[in-house]
Amino acid sequence: MSLIVRDTEASTDSATRTLTVPRRRRAAKVRASSTSRPGRPSGTITAVKWLVISAAIVLSLLPILYMIGMSFKSPDDILSTRILPSRLAFENWASAFQNFPILTYLRNSVGSALIAVLVALLVAVPANYAIARLRAGGKQALGTLVSAYIAPPVVAIVPLFVLVRTVGLMDSVIGLGIVEGLLLTPVAVWLLDGFFRAIPFEIDEAAQIDGCGPFRTLWSVILPLTAPGIVAVSIIVFILVYNDFLIPLLLTQSVDSQTLPVGISLMQGGREVVFGQMAAASLAGLIPIYLLAMFLQKWLVGGLTQGSVK
């Protein structure tokens, strides 16, 4: 390509000067503009990411989808191992709530979980304050406390049963909640440790200068700063107690105190297991947990993230 530049001040017989622009520079410029911007992932990487995320979502929802399908299957469809039901058996849901006290099981599960959360926080919050802020017990205090949760609960079944029966808390929702809360106290202490240690010690010194003692500092200064962590730990403890099976099976004997996992395990007919009704009861039990996770997801994720940053 040639660019002709003429001198207007010169005469018509003056020489014409010619400037030549190489074609390679233009091609290089076009190639540079056609490439993707630096820092942005290519289309292949984005497709792989969405594929992995979709696979994870499908795998996590597959058990729930299977349970939903089973709750609408007739006994013949269940025995024939059909993937999809031949008809929608809505009677499974009606029979589950008519033949079994599902609402009572749900009430007991939620009640024991709330009591356990209260007991765990009443013990874990002062313990964390003493260990992280007052440096009580030395460096090994937290590890020693958390190590109590490492042993499986099965090894403590017999002494726990004798202890609970001795204090008169057998077959009681309140007793079940207290025992569950005490058993999960090491977990609550371990999860709250990061939140308490993330607060600068200058705040405690400022509170002491203002005349606050340890209890006043904990209540007026430390607790408001660790509120997101306390909410996150409360949700985790609630879910652990709500889904527990071994301890309620050991400490409850009547319908008035049995939780939903224990009640579902007892949903058996005369000569057959009513899988459709069990699936319906299980889905009914999932509703409170999903609602809790849905409405408190921001506090749960935000609290855990804040506690992990120091």
Image (cartoon, rainbow, N blue to C red):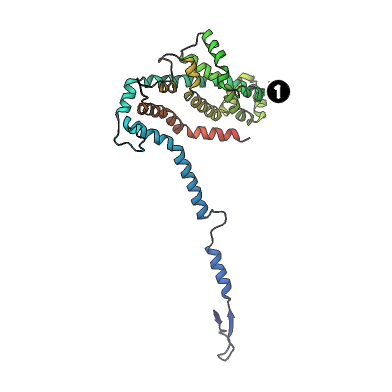
Extreme-right residue of the structure: 138
Task: Kindly identify the residue that appears in the image at 50 percent across and 27 percent down.
Answer: 235
Q: Position of residue 141 (x, y in %)?
A: 67, 22
Task: Kindly identify the residue that appears in the image at 40 percent across and 29 percent down.
Answer: 287
Extreme-bottom residue of the structure: 13
> In this rendering, is residue 22 above or below 170?
below
On-image quarter of the C terminus? top right
Task: Kindly identify the residue that appears in the image at 56 percent across and 35 percent down.
Answer: 305
> In this rendering, is residue 22 above or below 161?
below
Q: Position of residue 129 (x, y in %)?
A: 63, 23
On-image quarter of the N terminus? bottom right
Q: Residue 74: in sight, yes or no?
A: no
Q: Position of residue 142 (x, y in %)?
A: 65, 24
The residue wearing badge 1 is 138
Kind of residue at disc 1: Gly
At mark 1, the secondary structure is loop
Residue placed most toward the observer, 84 or 121: 84
